[in-house]
Image: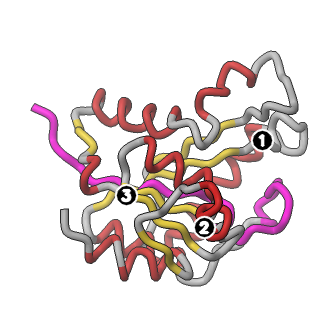
Amino acid sequence: MLRKINVLFLDRDGTINRDIGTYVASREQFQLIDGAALAIALARNAGFRIVVITNQAGIAKGIVTPEEVEDIHRHMNELLAPSGAFCDQVYYCPTHPEYPHPVYDRYSFCRKPETGMVDRAIEEYRLSGYEVDISRSFFIGDKTVDIECGKRAGLRSILVRTGHGEEELCRAKGVVPDFIADDLLTAVNDYVLNSDE
């Protein structure tokens, strides 16, 4: 029998770390947003698994390599560790529709707002003996594609105003988040940890 778990799916750039206006290509460029580590620690303490879902088209564009992206994710967990936080899994999509690539194009189904990365996470948990409780899981991000991805996957979705903070674009496209927060810490404190089923 599968054991149920709750998952907090998080966008990366603009949600966990500062959006620098281009692709993060090194450890030095990766800077946590104030309160992000505490937010992740609080969610973990409340029983959530933490899964990062991030488009990294800089790979297809030749700006950053998969190895560099993975090193940045190791660094992210190193920065989170002093707060008692870490991310359980990180999924990234290397493709971009305007930059065809013979290797990366096969991953187009995973590029947000498509749900491929979320689906893969849920399936990998299932294969490990866990069932993700969709009704008690969330998706937090700073872009319309994050909200749309979360909604398509059946998750409650939160838009944060850090990073791109696309409130107006969400309204224009009719992609309505379940909650809007100033940052990740506020999202976790005011909505994730206080939501009824």
Query: Around disc 3, counting alpha carbons within 10 Å, would you say few (fewer than 14), some (14 to 19), or many (20 or more)?
Result: many
The main secondary structure of the magenta stretch is loop
Disc 1 residue type? Ala
**Protein image colouring:** secondary structure
For residue 139, side relative to residue 91 (left or right)? left
Magenta range is 1-29
Q: Which residue is mark 2?
A: 15
Q: Is residue 28 magenta?
A: yes
**Disc 3: which residue:** 156
Which of labels 2 and 3 is toward the front?
3
Q: CA distance from mark 1 to mark 3?
A: 25 Å
Asked whether residue 17 appears in the rendered view, the answer is no
Q: Secondary structure at mark 3?
A: strand
Helix, strand or loop at label 1? It is loop
Amino acid beneath label 2: Thr
Report x, y in % for residue 46. Answer: 26, 69
Identity of the residue drawn at 29% across and 71% down = 45
Under circle 2, the secondary element is loop
Q: Which residue is mark 1?
A: 57
Residue drawn where x is 59% and y is 33% of the image: 110
Residue 23 magenta? yes
